Image (cartoon, rainbow, N blue to C red):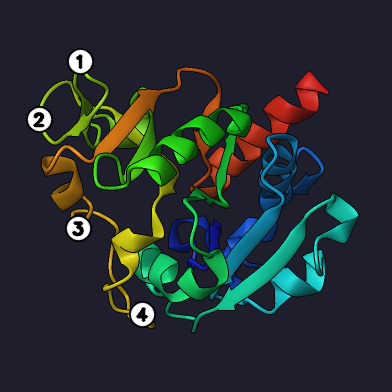
Amino acid sequence: MILAAGRGQRMRPLTDACPKPLLAVGGKPLIVWQIERLAAGGWRDLVINTGWLGAQIPAALGDGSALGVRLRYSPEPAQAYETGGGIATALPLLGAAPFLVVSADIHTTYDYASLHAPADTIAADPQHTAAHLVLTPNPEHNRDGDMALDAQGRIRREGARLNYGNIGVFHPALFAEQPRAQAWKLFPWLYGAADAGRVSGEVFSGPWHNVGTPEQLAALDAQLRGAG
């Protein structure tokens, strides 16, 4: 699942007429970079939730065949359902197996193929491991971090805090009893499973950008064009 429903307030005025996922860096929309990375990692059956100016996203991407994927959409109102509510609402499209969730507005070289193994672990024993999160070193906009990783590779609230990289694998049973078509945040709700020791994690220290402002968008665009 690609999360693409947010308003992108910090990106205004660019998002006044264009949904944030369709803003371009390095010659292509942010969400296309994500779709291409996911497809390269073997994740080709994708669900995208849409909200603010959401009709523009399926109009631009269609069924995904041009990008080598299958796209389906989970529409939300302009005031979207946040991460937790967006996932719960899309659950009927996501199926019975563990699924990967990423944000449309991150740009990274993370190898999504590496998440098939955690997905298999979750599928084999969801009571032991119900989710797996990818953390990164703390960026400038989140210097205090979000959560820690203990010596056993389990997510904890306390410890040397790292940034949640907006990349995670989840078992659908986690969301089965949660409200749909309502706005609620993934955190702190998910900490309940983490406190029970059911959330694993890893740290990715490679290129990772959360593109939140026009300045960050321009800087990444210049970086990608320079690399090209």
Choose top left, top right, bottom left or bottom right for residue 183: bottom left
Return the residue at label 3.
189
Q: Where does the image place residue 14, in percent across and percent down from the top left?
A: 61, 61
| 4 or 3: tag closer to the N-terminus | 4
The disc placed on residue 180 is 4
How far is the residue under mark 4 from the one under mark 2? 30 Å
Tag 4, which secondary structure? loop
| 3 or 2: tag closer to the N-terminus | 2
How far is the residue under mark 1 from the one under mark 4? 35 Å
Task: Locate the C terminus by quadrant.
Answer: top right
Residue 84 shown left or right of residue 18 in the figure: left
Label 2 CA crowd tier, 10 Å (few <14, some 14–19, many 20+): few
Return the residue at label 2.
158
Tag 1, which secondary structure? loop
Q: Please state which amino acid type lies under the numbered disc 4.
A: Arg
Q: Please state which amino acid type lies under the numbered disc 3.
A: Trp
| 2 or 1: tag closer to the N-terminus | 1
